[in-house]
Image: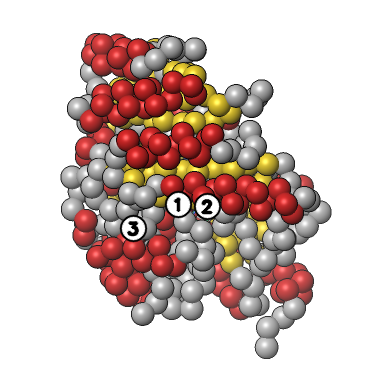
Amino acid sequence: MLDSIDAAARSLGEDLPGLVSLPGDDRYAAATSIWAKQVGVAPAAVVHCRTAKEVQATIRSARKHGLPLSVRGGGHDWAGRALCDGAVIDLSGMRNVEISADRRTAMIAGGARAADVIAATDPLGLAVVAGSVSRVGVAGLTLGGGYGPLIGRFGLALDNVLTAEIVLADGRILYADSTTNVDLFWALRGGGGNFGVVTAMRHRVHDLPSVHSGMLVYPFSEARAVLERCSLLTAQAPDELTVQQTLVADPGGAVMVLIVPTWSGQPEDGEARLQPFTRLGTLLAGRIERQSYAALLSMFDPYIANGLETVMDSCWLPALDRNAIDAFIGAMDDRVSPGCAIVTHEFRGAASRVAEAATAFGLRRDHLVVEILASFPDRSDAGDWLRHWRWVRATRERFASALPGGYPNFLASDDLDRARQSYGGNAARLMQIKRRYDPDNVFSSAIPLPRST
Ligand SMILES: Cc1cc2nc3c(=O)[nH]c(=O)nc-3n(C[C@H](O)[C@H](O)[C@H](O)COP(=O)(O)OP(=O)(O)OC[C@H]3O[C@@H](n4cnc5c(N)ncnc54)[C@H](O)[C@@H]3O)c2cc1C
């Protein structure tokens, strides 16, 4: 017989003295204040873990008292999967980053954000493959994929993982790499937080003293020409060049086209490689600069606000072709508020050359992720939520050439059919490994896996 949720939370506190905070505590408030605004989810307790042993004790105690579990890393899952009604395993006290003596690898603790990693690597002229912003948790990003500006040269973040330390649903602490617990290591690279709590991962480190990049702002009235020219340039680009396109409203509500090209190859080639992107139309603002990787990952910080209500959907597109450009422009013409935005992430080069069966990640061909976002202050007006939801859904439907599935980190928790399509030929093996390592689905709050067959 399970305890009531409050009694279970108190029992958890008795089992784990000093580690647990409850509603009303400052530590609880800090851990539960995440990027996505939470509606109707109030965790009974947060456990502030600092070591793998504490994570182990938390899992065992929570399961004994019948408390559901979730894992909070960097707190930047768009759907708020870090929180659940039961106990939240808060990893934000585990953010250590240790560079190996030969500077070829970094051991990154399970709660570290990209900002923690670049604070350690940037001064040494080194880089770990991460996403395009500094505040996102490295483990959360990496376990589901990890698209970022270095993708063409070094692959997804998960292609750069060498070992993982993980606490399983039964409390065992295991190591996984290419020779030990091989199945688990395969599943962790793409299957998200479905297999346990990753307390540390060793990532490959690359020499990267600087990059060239810049946020180039063009008027929405020229969006078609700008996006077409951008698409032509990227089609012939070498692996070291990636481009992000964003359509977003400025504070006054006017839509802008933001083009962010990044060159991660030889510094002396950067200026020449990126200059053509400054001539896509009437450049309103922005310039190409040689800068640190840390500066690049902070570029979007002013646009990222915590605690907004956000409706999101996404899709995988084979290319930014004429139809896709029509869809981008049509969607922004029909925007329902200044909070509507569309963002792309490229997948190419080194990421596309990895064999599909090499990791659980299911789509290994050149493509774009299209992120469709609508943010607004609160849902007190139910009509407001519906309006934004309809815009997001209608926008996804505009992308007629979308590939089946979608980026698992961006799928909704009940999107099981698209999850199956996302993992493609890897779905059956992934589910077998899930059943072996988490038969009771303790980590059900993670990104969706294919529906069980
Ligand atoms: C503003 C913003 C920008 C983004 N940019 C990018 C981008 O450029 N590229 C990209 O690929 N993705 C991007 N994402 C998506 C992001 O990678 C995922 O949402 C990721 O899950 C966030 O990880 P987190 O630790 O910050 O999130 P959290 O909300 O803390 O965690 C989300 C879930 O990840 C799992 N998880 C996190 N840490 C661990 C761990 N140590 N062990 C086991 N499971 C864990 C858990 O299931 C957890 O519930 C972005 C998201 C946002 C909100």
Q: CA distance from mark 1 to mark 2?
A: 6 Å
Earlier sequence position, callout 3 versus callout 1: 1
Residue tagged 2: 393
Q: Position of residue 179 (x, y in %)?
A: 21, 60
Residue tagged 1: 397
Viewer-side label of 2, 3: 2
The amino acid type of the residue labelled 2 equals Arg
The residue carrying pointer 2 sits among few (fewer than 14), some (14 to 19) or many (20 or more) residues within 10 Å by Cα, namely some
Residue tagged 3: 404
Vertical comparison of 167 with 131: above or below: below
> Quick one: 405 or 187, which is closer to the camera?
405
Apparent side of residue 169 relative to residue 49 in the rendered image (left or right):
left
Vertical comparison of 102 with 393: above or below: above
Q: Quadrant of residue 46?
A: bottom right
Tell me what residue is drawn at x 32 percent, y 35 percent. Answer: 322
Which quadrant holds the C terminus? bottom left
Q: Secondary structure at mark 2?
A: helix
The amino acid type of the residue labelled 1 equals Glu
Q: Position of residue 229 (x, y in %)?
A: 31, 23
Q: Quadrant of residue 65?
A: bottom right
Q: Secondary structure at mark 1?
A: helix
Viewer-side label of 3, 1: 1
Q: CA distance from mark 3 to mark 1?
A: 12 Å
